Structure formats: structure tokens, C-alpha cells
Amino acid sequence: MTHSDQKNSSAAERLLLLQSHLVHGDSNVATGVRDLAEERAAASFNVVDMADFFAGGKEAADYMRTAYQIIRRDPILYLSTGSPFNDTQLQEREKTMAQIRRYVEISRNMKDPKQRAAFELAMNIYSESFSMRIYVHEMLFKQSFLLNGTVEQYEEWKDDIESWKCIGCYAMTELGHSSFLRGLETTAVFDRETDEFIINSPTITSTKWWIGMAGETATHTVAICQLIIDGKQYGTFWFVVQLRDYAAGRLMPGVTAGNIGPKAGRQGLDNGWIQFNGVRIPRKNMLMRWATVTREGKFTQAPHAALSYAALIPERLSCLFATANMCGQAATIATRYSCVRRQGPKDEKVMDFQTQQVRLMPAVATVYVCSVVSRVMMAHWGNMTSMINDQPEEFLRLLSDVHAVSAGFKAVSTWRGSEVLEMCRRACGGHAYSAHNALAGIIGDWGVVTTGGGDNIVLTQQTAVSRHAACIYCAEVVF
């Protein structure tokens, strides 16, 4: 046998070995397809009923199925061509913004509000970069108007926000400060002569940092600043500041902003930095539902200290959904892989080993727990926010408790999420090191969830202090 024949024979043997991993010895049908079908058929529960439960009921599940059909049939929403793992940061951001434009267009034409909500939810599940952009605009920017602005202020901005003519971001975090709101350095100085606030970033550490959509996209921001009147500092409040003009996206006078650069994940979101240098805004751009400043410069304090953190509550509750969503993706990948992976044609499926089950079953359980708790807590928060206009006293009464609970849920769920994602990665062996396995990308996207919205150690301390105080109060009442 010649050297060339030996090489050809060796290559053929390797191909046959690979084929044996994919195709059953006595059949031309790939074993993976058959193995998955067998696993599904062997379920001890009704799969459709479980899917309905997971979605929040049959009606919600049907709306979600329709939403996924809309996505699959749309060439802009559904990225069916090319590999997203080979996209550059610029390409991913262009695709994400194209998805948002198409999403807004389709949503406008949806008459059924439940279908519209399901469509948004499906898109959030489909793309983490999309979900973060929607989240920043809807949950942080828009919610700031709802929670901290007057009815008149919200009505003034509502149409531009909902049409995405005004693209918003939420400028809280600074280079030198994050969870410590009292330490924020950006200032809003009231100018009585012009009836304006002057926004300034007095130091390098006061630079607004990690602000989603500030890098390239946002036209406006709700900036948290230290309110100063006649040299006296009154604390942090919310101010609407225009960053870019509508027509060309050019930065407004006095505003300097840029892109932070490559990140561990969510490359489709342009996290950025902002500095203000003597930016003037009208007095009415201070969100004044709770605290006010009159034309004469008279300040009225907010009735509750926890209002400073109210806008962060939906962010923290959304981490429960993020845990269910992203861990659900990871658990699906790892479980399906384990149900088809065999070391050889006569070997058992990896999932048949107890060690693999011990790894993955708790991961699946985590997904269900976080999904249910997320629905309950978001429904509770929705009921609370509906009270703001007609029952503000009741909203304020409930605020401290839900703030403490949301902080604890955020910390515990995201810590657990990190454990689940890593366990799923390990369960897939060497294949999980490939970007095409998708687990590496999910883990990269996940990192911001454990950090954003407050450091988990600080949040658990807040929950502990609140629950300890509640226990003392109960003991005093009972005994």
C-alpha cells in the first residue's frame, strides 16, 4: 500500500467513526432526531399543558405561539441568513436597530394589547441585545416619567417615547459611583433668572458611565443629579436632558458622549459615557411628581426616601425573568445535547447517567421557579403602579416592602443563574467551548445581570435590614 493509500484509508476510518456517532448502525436515520422524539414521548406529563403553564396559561401560550410565528416569518426580525457568531460589533448593532424599527412598525398595527405584549416578550426572549435596548427605553426611561413625573409631564412626552422618535436612556451610574446614590456628583443648579437648571459634570468621576444606548443612539436621558438651589444641596432627583438632535443625531451643545467599547456580551447595545458642561434645560424638565421646585426657587421635598430607588424596582424584578429566560435557554441546550450525545453507537445517552441528571434537573427546576415568581412579582408591581395617580398614599405604603423584596430576589436569582449557566456549560463538555454551542454567548450576556441594578452583597444587606426591622415590629405588636 502506498503512502497516499494509507492516508486515504486513515481519513475514511475517521469519517466512518464520525458517522457512527451520528447515524445508528442499522438505520440511515440520525439517532439524535430519534432520541429526542423518544425522550419527548416518554414524558410523564402532558407537554402542551406544561407549556401553557410555563407561559402563564393557555391564552398567554397561544399569544406567544402567534408572536413566534410573526418573528419567524419576518426576514428582518428573524436572522435566518449567515452566522451571528461571525458578526462584528457594528453589524450586530445595525441588525438590532433594524429589528427595533421593524418591531415598532408591527406593534403599531396590532390592535390587541395582549398580542402586542406577547410580541414584545417573544422578541425579548429571542435577542438579548434587543431586550436590553427595549428595557432601557421602556423600563428605565419611560418608567421614570410614570413613577417620578407628573401626569402632565408624561402626557407631554408620551407620543414621542412610544413612537421612538425620542429614544431614551437612564443616566444614573457614574464612573466613581453606582449604588451609592447620595454620592453622585453630577449637578443640576437652578438659575432663578432664566427659570432653568444648569447640568454639569464637575469631575472625571462624575462622568455618567455604562449608560445603555448613550454611546450612539439615545436622543434624551433621564439623568440623576444633585439638586442645588442658592448653593444649598437638596439631594438627587431626575432631570430630562436632550443628548442629540432628532434630525442628524448630533450631540447637543455642552454634551460630550461616546461609546465605552467592546464588552463581555450584548454587543448589540451601545453602552456609553456622558459628560455635561453647562447644559441648560427648562425647569419643567425636572420630574416633579413627588418633589418640586417653583419658579421662585422654593423646594418641596418628596414624602418618602425610598422613592429614590423606585425606578430600580422593575429593573430588579426583571432579573427574575432574565434568570428564567437565559437559564431556560442554557438548560434547553444542555438537556437536548445530553439526550442525543453518545460516546459510541452502543453507549447509553449521557442523560441516562445519574451524574448528568444531578447536574441538569436542578437547572430546569430553577427555570420554573423563577418564571412563576417573576410573573407574581411583576403582577404585584403592576397593581402598585396603577395606584400612583388615584391612590398615591397606598403606593407609598407598599413601596418599602417591595423595594426590599425585589432587592433580595434580584441578588438570589442572579447568583443562582450564574451557577446554572456554568453547570450547563460543563454538562456539554468540550462542545460548549465553541461559540456555535451558544452557551458561551449566553454566559457573556449574563454578566451584566449580576452586576446591573445594584451589587448583590449590598442588595442582600438591604433585604436583611428590612426583614429584621419587620421582625422587631411584629414582635413588639404581638408581645
Image: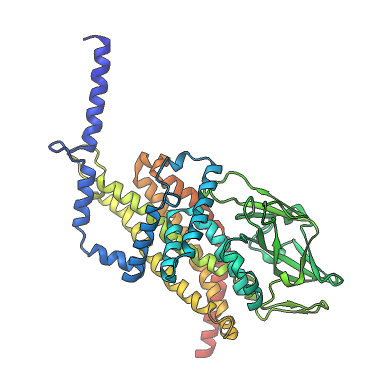
Determine whether 471 is above or below 122 in the image.
below
Residue that extends furthest to the left in the rendered view of this protein = 26
Q: Is residue 309 left or right of residue 362?
A: right
Q: Position of residue 176 (x, y in %)?
A: 70, 55
Q: Is residue 228 left or right of residue 157?
A: right
Residue 468 visible (yes or no): no
Between 74 and 235, which is closer to the camera in this rendering? 74
Residue appearing at x 22%, y 65% in the figure: 46
Residue appearing at x 34%, y 44% in the figure: 428
Q: Position of residue 103 (x, y in %)?
A: 48, 58
Which color scheme is applied? rainbow
Residue that extends furthest to the top in the rendered view of this protein = 2
Residue 395 visible (yes or no): yes
Residue appearing at x 54%, y 88% in the figure: 476
* Residue 15 figure quarter: top left
Q: Is residue 393 left or right of residue 129?
A: right
* Residue 118 figure quarter: bottom left
Between 352 and 13, which is closer to the camera in this rendering? 13
Quadrant into which the N terminus falls? top left
